[in-house]
């Protein structure tokens, strides 16, 4: 599976090993994992909503664009939805290339695009209430560099 | 007939995940004008369109996009994935 949208936790080590075994000729694999930040007790949980009919397609389109723009041998994306506790993994990307520059750049591109072009919405739940995470202007600006 | 979907705070403000709308709206802009008249909650949800994004048949679209042939229109705030 090159794109997986799931509520269940994932084993990053197992995912990366499976990915590494699925590509041949790679000289570099870059991995990134995003976690629910533990903000000193201010966060009880994070609830991630998504648009099931659109999510996988949108994420796959971003992955395909990365494959076209860099000399990648492969790319995988796992993104969770539902209720997550602080410290839990939200998502991961892994990219493989012959050389590290392509793998690093493509991984950053994937992260920038997943942030503001994949239909997920995060809500922070704390002891004093809950609120939707606002999109940041610099997330949108980050897209301009690609 | 168009299926209209809401996500995140739009869903909460309107109090519905989706609704079926009988409409002649030719564009998203016209559809939003119609939706605003459905209830105060709708009017509030659509009061600041700079905070609203739209997808037509699961593809991101502009707020003034055509609805020709559209079956599903989703409204949501700017995405916060990753």
Image: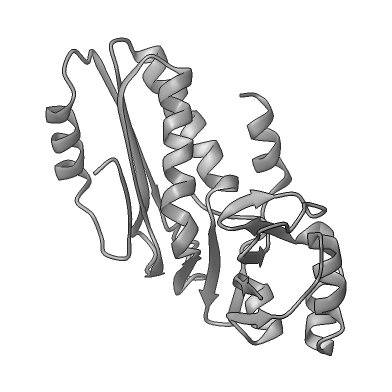
- Name the foreground residue: B70 vs A53: B70
Asked if residue B82 is positioned above or below residue A68 in the image, the reply reads below
Q: Residue at 48%, 19% (x, y): give it.
A: A69
For the C terminus of chain A, which image quadrant? Answer: top right
Question: Residue A18: horizontal and vertical position, in percent?
Answer: 14, 37
Q: Quadrant of residue A52?
A: bottom left
* Figure quadrant of residue B21: bottom right
Q: Quadrant of residue B17?
A: bottom right
Measured along the vertical axis of the image, is residue B19 above or below residue A4?
below
Residue A76 drawn above or below residue A128? above
The total of numbered circles placed on residues is 0
Q: Quadrant of the N terminus of chain A?
A: top left
Identify the residue shown where x is 53% and y is 76%. Answer: A126
Residue B13 or residue A32, whichever sits in front: B13
Q: Give the image location of residue B41, x and y in percent.
A: 78, 86
- How is the model colour-coded? one colour
Residue at 45% over, 45% down: A59
Given residues A42 and B30, the one toward you in this image is: B30
Residue visible at 85% across and 62% down in the picture: B29
Relative to A83, B47 lies left or right: right
Q: Position of residue B35 (x, y in %)?
A: 80, 78
Position of A33 relative to B79 (above/below): above
Q: Residue furthest top?
A: A99
């Amino acid at each position: 599976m090159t794109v997986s949208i799931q509520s269940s936790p994932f084993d990053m080590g197992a995912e990366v090993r499976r990915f590494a075994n699925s590509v041949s000729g790679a000289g570099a694999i870059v991995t990134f994992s995003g976690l629910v930040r533990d903000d000193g007790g201010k966060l009880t949980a994070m609830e991630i909503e998504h648009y099931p009919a659109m999510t996988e397609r949108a994420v796959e389109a971003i992955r395909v664009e990365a494959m076209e723009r860099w000399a990648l041998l492969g790319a995988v994306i796992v993104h969770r939805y539902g209720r997550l506790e602080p410290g839990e993994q939200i998502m991961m990307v892994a990219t493989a290339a012959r050389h590290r520059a392509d793998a690093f750049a493509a991984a950053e591109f994937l992260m920038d695009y997943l942030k503001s072009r994949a239909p997920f919405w995060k809500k922070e739940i704390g002891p004093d209430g809950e609120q939707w995470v606002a999109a940041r202007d610099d997330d949108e600006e980050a897209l301009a560099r690609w | 007939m168009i299926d209209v979907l809401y996500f995140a705070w739009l869903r909460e403000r309107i109090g519905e995940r989706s609704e079926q709308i009988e409409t002649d709206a030719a564009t998203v802009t016209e559809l939003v004008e119609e939706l605003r008249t459905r209830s105060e909650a709708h009017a509030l949800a659509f009061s600041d369109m700079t905070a609203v994004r739209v997808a037509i048949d699961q593809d991101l679209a502009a707020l003034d996009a055509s609805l020709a042939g559209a079956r599903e229109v989703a409204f949501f705030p700017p995405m916060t994935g990753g």
